Amino acid sequence: MKTQLFTTIILSTALTVSGQTTFQKTYGGADGDFGLSVQQTTDGGYILFGQTWSFGSGSQDMYLVKTDYQGNEQWSQTFGGTKLEFGISAQQTTDGGYILCGAYSGLSNDSLALIKTDQSGNEVWNKRYSGTVDRDVGQFVQQTSDSGFIAVGFTGPAFNEHIYMVKTDFNGNEQWSKVHNSSGREFAVGVVQTSDGGYAMIGETNGKGFGGKDMFLVKTNATGDTTWTKTYGTPSDEIGRSLYITSDNGFILLGYEDSTVGKLYLVKTDSLGNEQWSNYYGSTGSDMGHSVKQTSDGGFILAGRKDGTFGSSGTVDMYCIKTDSTGAIEWEYTFPRGLLSEAYSVQQTTDGGYILLGYTTDTVGGVDSDMYLVKIDPWGTVSIFDNDLPTLNIFAYPNPFTEYTTIELNDSKNREFSMTLLNSQGQIIRTIKNITVGQIILKRDDLTSGLYIFQLTTGRQVVAVGKLIIE
């Protein structure tokens, strides 16, 4: 079992470190396997969805994996025929089963597909929907307040796609569908049901806005008719990838600049889609944002990829950013694995941490890739717990402090520890090594007022994490 010990030290009283599960896991076979959608399930585990070349009945099939809370696979299922099938979005349903969204039957004549399963991933029904005589691809599905489903994607020939919406009942019977015709190329990759019973979709347009491609937000009524649209971006190309309704009934949108030197692009709007603020994140490489959620503290969690020197592997790495409610970075980390790793889905978990899903590969072009699942703690770290390490009792006093604090730790095995101090952005600002006694005196010196995180390690194992506050 891979577990991180976690403590929050705010008052000058003794606290026993409690469990915070973190891990890094891969799933798949000898060929290409990709993860695009993750959700924590009601039993505390996770449902992963994507596509596989390693298993199934055809060249590429939809791939559904269920794990426990530690990421251990409990079962997996594939769906598809002899052609190419794409698994893109999945969600647990109110009956404990799952709804899957993607496309069936190849590249040029796909059908938007919805598959309903039971709790074990066994198919209950399988439906296909078409908006035009050309291809139809599903990008996202959500269960609606009437227990039915709303799915969005695109329809039409390559480079002339239009937004496609399908509303069904609980059994997948189509209630209505809409093709949003436009003068340019437009498609939707995400949808949320709004409090008025209508829907909001995020995607991309090249037919309106600031020029080139722009992030696109479309609001509809309950039957899919457009009530308003908004675009966000610059004369460069911006792609919309993820949408979430915020606690103030506005929207948070994530995407990226479509460029070799692109950055993650985050936009906060009010309930009518009017921009309140926007931020870019990244450096000199082609950085991308694929998934965003609001967190329990009112901030946001972003996931995607980091290209270039920031990643510790120096290549392309899975990337996660935590911001406050104004978009200011609180911390950012990469989770490198193989030649390339990338996150397509993120969610805050019930323990306050986060779960990320994507893929990793050691080969150019992803010929041999695997689903890549990463569970991190509330501060964005992954650690390995040595089962032989006893529980630590930790005192920090005074805390908050002004000039210095004393951290006492009780380790019955008398091991040697190191301590790393990080600021609220996750940057390392101080390291203390070779701690062989049970007391650490931490002086303020040039540290400014605010929140700090410390990590205690023995060898390469993070065994405790805590908060310190300087007044």
Image (tube, helix red, strand yellow):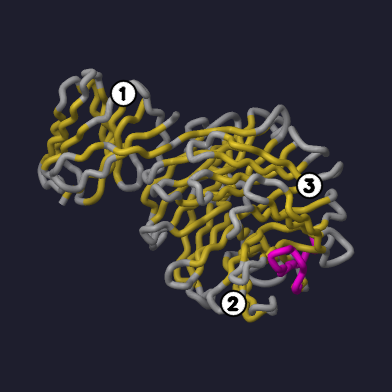
Which segment is the magenta one? 159-176
Separation of residues labelled 2 and 3 (CA atoms): 31 Å
* Spot occupied by residue 471 in the image (x, y as percentages of width and height): 15, 52
* 265 with respect to 107 (left or right): left
* Spot occupied by residue 283 in the image (x, y as percentages of width and height): 49, 46
Residue 96 forms part of the magenta stretch: no
Instruction: Give the vertical position of 443 relative to 254 (above or below).
Output: above
Question: Which amino acid type is marked by label 3?
Answer: Glu
* 380 with respect to 195 (left or right): left
Instruction: Give the vertical position of 34 relative to 232 (above or below).
Output: above
Task: Give the numbered dot on residue 85.
Answer: 3
Which residue corresponds to the image point at 47% horizontal and 40% vertical from the top-left? 375
Question: Which amino acid type is marked by label 2?
Answer: Gly
Name the one closer to the observer, 430 or 341. 341
Which residue corresponds to the image point at 48% horizontal and 71% vertical from the top-left? 250
Instruction: Give the vertical position of 104 relative to 437 (above or below).
Output: below
Secondary structure, mark 2, is loop
Quadrant for the N terminus, please. Answer: top left
Nearer the camera: disc 2 or disc 3 = 2
What residue is shown with label 2?
197
* Spot occupied by residue 263 in the image (x, y as percentages of width and height): 54, 51
What residue is shown with label 1?
389
